[in-house]
Amino acid sequence: MAGKANKSIFFCQECGYESAKWMGQCPGCHAWNTMVEEPVRQTASGKASTKISPARRGTSRAVTFREISAEEAPRYATGIGEFDRVLGGGLVRGALTLIGGDPGIGKSTLLLQAARLMSAAGSRVLYVSGEESLSQIRLRAERIGPCEDQLKFYCETDMEEIQAVIETEKPAVLIIDSIQTMACSEVSAAPGSVSQVREVTGLLLKIAKSAEISTFIVGHVTKEGTVAGPRVLEHMVDTVLYFEGDRHASYRVLRAVKNRFGSTNEIGVFEMRDTGLGEVENPSGFMLEGRPEHASGSVVTCAVEGTRPILMEVQALVARTSFGFPRRQATGADINRVNLLLAVLEKRVGLNLSDCDAYVNLAGGIRMQEPALDLGICLALASSFRNAPVTGNLVVFGEVGLSGEVRTVSLAEQRVAEAARLGFEQCILPAALAKRIKAPAGLRLTGVGNLEDAIRAAF
Ligand code: TYD
Ligand code: MG
């Protein structure tokens, strides 16, 4: 084009890789068709910032380990137990936290609830929304409950305006909903593009660290890559949480995938109600609600999410196929794993499944890919095939190997304890674990070495 040549750079929408020319595949993350052209404006300050200014030269120095103060960063409680648990014991002052998740999963609801409780506990909270109008926020807040005056709302997408309001309000907690709607006028790219998202996050990082404001950033995840995914941000923030769950099922899981102030093993379980998100303190009871007793094809197994054992029901339906080749389908479980287990049942146990359709479902809309579910899936399939229910009040867990052996899994004590807590009477588990673990009161442990033993013990 004639005239002033506008400089532009190609960014990968997945990982933020930069390149001067377009490429079909990103060299950074090997994703296809993710490079998008974005205009950039070079500023003089951008070049100068790499140099040390004369005034600062000589004032900073490296320190020894002993000089580092052992003081723990102060934490606030958000007032939501499950949320605090995932954050590693509360919100750290000045921490930047990203909450990612599909649209409509409940990110705004969770943050509004936390904002309400934190403001009620005396913290100044500023909720900035670029997605909803004040009246829409009001409608949501009405479902959740009244808000204190310490909680202020502001609808804006321009970062300069937001920065000015932050300076006057001086909040202790800031919520930015969502990063994809915010824009700095210095960057000419559209809101939601990689360069815009990066610039806005950089600015928020600076504000959070200099004024010690605990900041939550909401980020949408999209598969199409039209909006910059929060992947680019994950490197910049202190904590990354993902809010996930089936939109049609009411339970939600909040999971930490990065946490500079705590473990990433914790999960929080919530339930979407018509008055907002409720904490689920007993996820096992929640998952097993409405389970059919003494029905064939239904087996209770114990999976571990993070470090928490959760009992769940595996359902299987095996029926004679009416077409040329059998249909296999899995909801919640990995279909490849189910196919493998069907082959093991056929070859090692002698169940003639090759002319049967098989459907496996983890009840409650939960998604789980843990080897410990193998035994539960196998027994559910066997139970449906024989059209006979497994013995009452039974929990099973264990990994199944290709020769039909039942192998040990991690965190067995916790799984057994959870089964006992919910009043189960028998637990079928790998033989090596049955020898090692002391049975809790009321629970009989049955160790099995292979799938045939397990089937004998279960029926
Ligand atoms: P929302 O927090 O807006 O999701 P996100 O910010 O992640 O896009 O939640 C959206 C869904 O939650 C919406 O479909 C309505 C539902 N919802 C309830 O079921 N109960 C409630 O009390 C609230 C506030 C929302
Ligand atoms: Mg929202």
Image (tube, grey):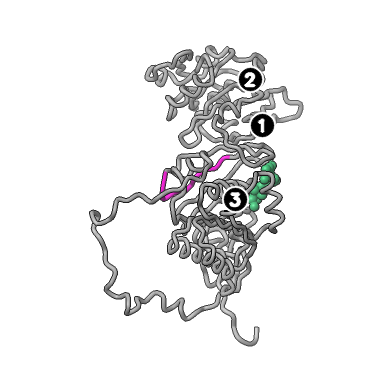
Tag in front: 2 or 3: 3
Give the image quarter of residue 314.
Answer: top right
Q: Which residue is mark 2?
A: 352
Q: Amino acid at mark 2?
A: Asn
In this view of the protein, which residue sits in the foreground, 58 or 90? Answer: 90
**Res. 342 visible in picture:** no
Task: Decide whether residue 254 is among the magenta residues.
Answer: yes
How many C-alpha atoms fall within 10 Å of the one at disc 2: few (<14), some, or many (≥20)? few
Measured Cα–Cα span from mark 2 to mark 3:
65 Å
Indicate the secondary structure of the residue bearing disc 2.
loop
Q: Position of residue 400 (x, y in %)?
A: 50, 26
In this view of the protein, which residue sits in the foreground, 172 or 255? Answer: 172
Up-down: is 73 above or below 455? below
Q: Quadrant of the C terminus?
A: top right
Tag in front: 3 or 1: 3
Q: Which mark is first along the chain, 3 or 2?
A: 3
Question: What segment is highlighted magenta in the picture?
Answer: 253-262
In this view of the protein, which residue sits in the foreground, 326 or 12? Answer: 12
Q: Position of residue 193 (x, y in %)?
A: 60, 65
Q: Which residue is mark 1?
A: 328
Task: Decide whether residue 221 is among the magenta residues.
Answer: no
Up-down: is 110 above or below 405? below
Q: Which residue is mark 3?
A: 148
